[in-house]
Image: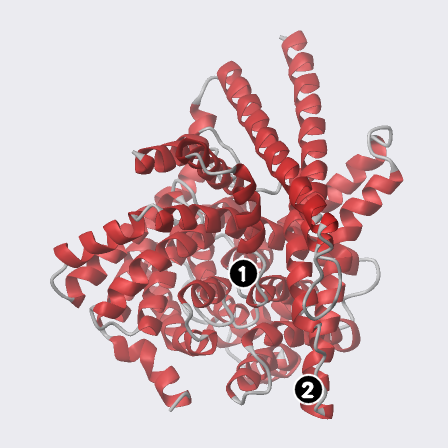
Amino acid sequence: MILVQSFLSNRQKNKKQKINFSVIQKKIEIGIPLICMILMTTIIFIQVVGRYLFHYSISWSEEVGRYLVIWITFGGSALAFRKGAHIGVNALVNILPTKIRYNVKLFSQLITIGFFVILGYYGTIHTVNQIIHLQLGPATRLPMAIPYSALPIGSALAIFYLINKIIRDIKNNNKESKKI
Amino acid sequence: MIVIILFGSLILNLAIGMPIAVAIGMSALVSFLYMGFPLAALAARMFAGVNSFTLLAIPFFMLAGSLMSEGGMSKRLIRFANAIVGILPGGLAHVQVLASMFFAALSGSAPATTAAIGSTLIPEMSKKGYPREFSAAVQSVAGTIGTIIPPSIPMVIFGVVGAQSIGKLFAAGFIPGIIYGLALMIIVYFISKKRKYVSTTEFSFKECWFSFKDSFWALLVPIIILGGIYSGIFTPTEAGAVACVYGLFAGVCIYKELNFNNLPIVFTTAAINTAMVLLIISAASVFSWILNIEGIAVLVGNWFISTSSGQTIFLLLVIVLLLFMGCFMETVACVLIITPILLPVAISLGIDPIHFGIVVIMTLSLGMSTPPVGENLYIAASIANVSFEKLVKNIWPFIIVAIIVILLIAFIPSISMFLPNYLYR
């Protein structure tokens, strides 16, 4: 419920900062998890109904399901970064005086970006390897590059939102310090 | 040395407020660098950690939970619970517990249960004169029942990591969940009597019957899910998909509260919540892989075997350890890291793995409402608009009761094992 509310308020906020997020970006960030959710529910439900009522099983449902889980993990967490939904331990940081707190937060955000840079870099290498060797999934015959590409794409989106957030934080901080 | 680096960097990362998933992943990365493993293996491990069909149950039960709470089921369940227990002293606090128990049978996540029931009841309670910190405290503990009564996301993860039957785990969680709820209602009763919270509702069979009829479609969900699993029509993972379609159907066609305006939001919210949990799983699977590859898991396991001479001491040690870990870490990450280490020890001591799983999950769920880190506490505090510290002061009686219940269930295995033994003869 809270998430829904924060999501709504975020949505309204976004209308104001149209300069920062183009319409296409918005569609990608919401589209990936949304399509994954709808697809996985539909496929698995059809699988259950088909098996129970018509004694017909879809051979590729399990594999597609796994790929969708991977996509929702990395594609969706980028969106979660944008919403600031990832949980962390703030109890200790909040004790610190404002100025140090700001720097610590900035530092932890930079490390988070670093983590996704590394993940994205090696994810790209894996994806490229899958393309070069033309690995195919056993049941679907889909290129394995499709699930693997979730790593670089998800990381890139996460980095994008994190940088955006840092810029916003710095701007806010400057405004506050000017007031004082 | 590697232990110090692994856990040291984890604690440091958590302390500076990094997102939990990244904190775990980063500590694994630092250890990879120290051990000289190629970092490409880190990305591959994170990929492999979520490349599992059973994990589909997590998005499904997240989605089912948000479809059902947005679709009007939680409101109706609250009304039904109010008709049953509303007349007791501290009536609405009892309603919180009972409605959380009902909703736990639809949802597999404790924060989702806390949010679904709390967002309706806590504002209502403050209108009726209950102190906000009291209702928030009741809700944050009652919300943990969400992961004990099936379906349950931590149980799915325990089943995946420990290679145990998820169906059996689901069955085993049922009775402990009910006992947990009843125990909470008893302490709520005594506190309410002492502080003179009176009930304003009057009991009527008519209201009971009408609210039952109105919430009938919601009460049918656990019967469909569990009935389908135990009759072998679908697996626990597929049960999630069935629950989603049922929730969508009921929300659109029967209760008519879902439409094209709020559906995308429901789906996206579920996707975000899922992604958060799955990213933690992905990172924690690398962490747990390092524990195994470096032999730390075996070391800890051997220490447990050598110190605990019997089942009793072992279970006590595990409960203390998990209560401590649960205070600082995310439930899902704890299940992933703890299970491969402790489950073999438990089995070697003759403890049933299913019973052990229930004890682990109950103890770790309680961690969600213990300070300093507890998702339920954050959610309840923000709904009730009270400070975290005020809420924490009010939560101790409930935590003590919860620990007593956990000990009871840990040392009387037949409580949790009755249903699975009966269903899987």
Q: Is residue B5 above or below residue B74?
A: above
- State whether discs 1 and 2 lie on one chain: no
Image quarter in which the N terminus of chain B is found: top left
Q: Position of residue B189 (x, y in %)?
A: 35, 65
The chain holding disc 2 is A
Q: Which mark is residue B340?
A: none
Taking the image as shown, residue B191 lies to the left or right of residue B109, namely left
User: How many numbered circles does the render carry?
Assistant: 2
Residue type at numbered disc 1: Thr
Specify the quadrant of the image occupied by residue B188: bottom left
Q: Is residue B254 above or below residue B199?
A: below
Q: Position of residue B214 (x, y in %)?
A: 66, 79
The residue most toward the front is A133
Q: Position of residue B38 (x, y in %)?
A: 51, 38
Residue B186 can be seen in this image: no
Which residue is rendered at x = 32% and y = 65% of the image?
Answer: B359
Residue bearing mark 2: A51
Specify the quadrant of the image occupied by residue B354: bottom left
Image quarter in which the C terminus of chain B is found: bottom left
The residue most toward the left is B309
Q: Which mark is residue B113?
A: 1
Taking the image as shown, residue B198 lies to the left or right of residue A77, namely left
Q: Residues within 10 Å of mark 2 (few under 14, many from 20)?
A: some
Which residue is rendered at x = 79% and y = 76% of the image?
Answer: B253
Of the pair B131 and B353, the residue shown nearer to us = B353
The chain holding disc 1 is B
